[in-house]
Amino acid sequence: MKPIPYGRQHIDQVDIDTVVATLKADFLTQGPKVSEFEEKFAAYVGAKYAVAVNNATSGLHISVLALDLKEGDRVITTSITFAASANCIRYAGAEVWFADIDPETYLLSIESVQQLIESKPKGFFKGIIPVDFAGLPVDLESFRALANKHDLWIIEDACHAPGGYFVDSKNKKQRCGNGSYADIGVFSFHPVKHIACGEGGMVTTNSKTLYKKLSLLRSHGITKENMQENHGGWFYEMQELGFNYRLTDIQSALGITQLAKNDIGVIRRNEISTRYKEAFNNKIKFQSLPIGAYNAHHLFVIEVNDRKGLYDYLRKQNVFAQIHYIPVHTLPYYKNIGYGSANLSSTELYYENCISLPMYPTLTKEEQSFVIEKVISFING
Ligand SMILES: Cc1ncc(COP(=O)(O)O)c(C=O)c1O
């Protein structure tokens, strides 16, 4: 069997032709493809506005800044995520407070968040960054109710979840990143994610004020709008200390064709997930699916007792499973600033047992059968 990774991009001839056409066009960066991608992405997730950025880490950074996060402020997130979900809080000089996960969904536990909030005086926290981990949408309706009670903002880290949704109490489908309950949603277009741009990201919101701030921060804080002075056609103002976090036209062209295929990809990911679940049912624990939720399935995670044994065994069989994630609070940077001893029992237990199996639209039936057979034979000893 040839090597089977845990995830991989799918680039076809349409993607290649579109990128080549963009290379021959007038703009390589900040041309028409960026705004086309933004408009199509906003329409896809059902948000009013979308701001394309050079990766999701930049997107998270400008999101916390747009929400006015300052040095010494405090924000709650999960430790079962990629470090960037927490790092954006540190970029603003603020404190990360990790709450525990739900042991069945692996998502940030609302009970744990609530306990943390209620153990502190009002105003102690500024916001919450829940993550649609593995592609499973967070119940943002419940998080919104909690956030409203305590005057907090919400950034939905939807990097794993374009195309995922949950159904709210009004029986309405709420697509990840649609901005109905979270203030801002952030997506990644890293190659292992659903939509591959090489590097890339998108920030979505329904707030015009946030949209304007995000757009300014993405591009040096420079604008030609609402200027204090105007010396002529060349004139611009730098109104904020912003960054160069722009996505190029070349990447946006690829993003547009990739986005067009996302629904098909998510359907295929769900077929793969169904097959894993049928094979593992009652034998192996996997991420549960709350009623009404549609998992976009960036990952398929199982829990096993001898996780390292399974990881090593699969590698010998050319199956490159992966671990998502080493808890962020145990990474040396966070340990060194005092986080290592956080009491997150479900997070720690999950990390001991978790392993992500291959999950990507072009995984063949034969490859998946091979993976299933190897996992089951390892479990059966
Ligand atoms: C949950 C999560 N948040 C943020 C990021 C950062 O994304 P990017 O690599 O586009 O900066 C990732 C990427 O791995 C991620 O998985």
Image (spheres, helix red, strand yellow):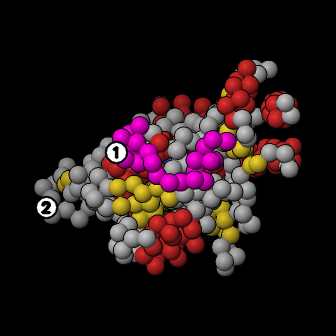
Camera-side residue of 93 and 292: 93
Q: Which residues are magenta?
A: 332-353
Q: Which mark is residue 229?
A: 2
On whether residue 348 falls in the magenta region, the answer is yes
Q: Where does residue 69 sit, x and y in percent of width and height?
A: 32, 60
Q: Say which of 4 and 97 sits in front.
A: 97
- Identified at 63% across, 47% down, the residue is 350
Q: Amino acid at mark 2?
A: Glu
Tell whether 334 sits left or right of 284: left
Q: Which residue is mark 1?
A: 337
Q: Secondary structure at mark 2?
A: loop
Could you tell me which residue is drawn at 16 percent across and 54 percent down? 232
Instruction: Give, as a three-letter code, the residue at label 1.
Output: Ile
Q: Secondary structure at mark 1?
A: loop
Question: Could you tell whether 313 is left or right of 51 in the image?
Answer: right
Quarter-of-image position of residue 193 = top right
In the drawing, what numbered circle is on residue 72? none
Q: Is mark 2 within 8 Å of ligand 1?
A: no
Q: Tell me the crowding category of disc 2: few under 14, some 14 to 19, or many 20 or more residues within 10 angstroms, Cα based.
A: few
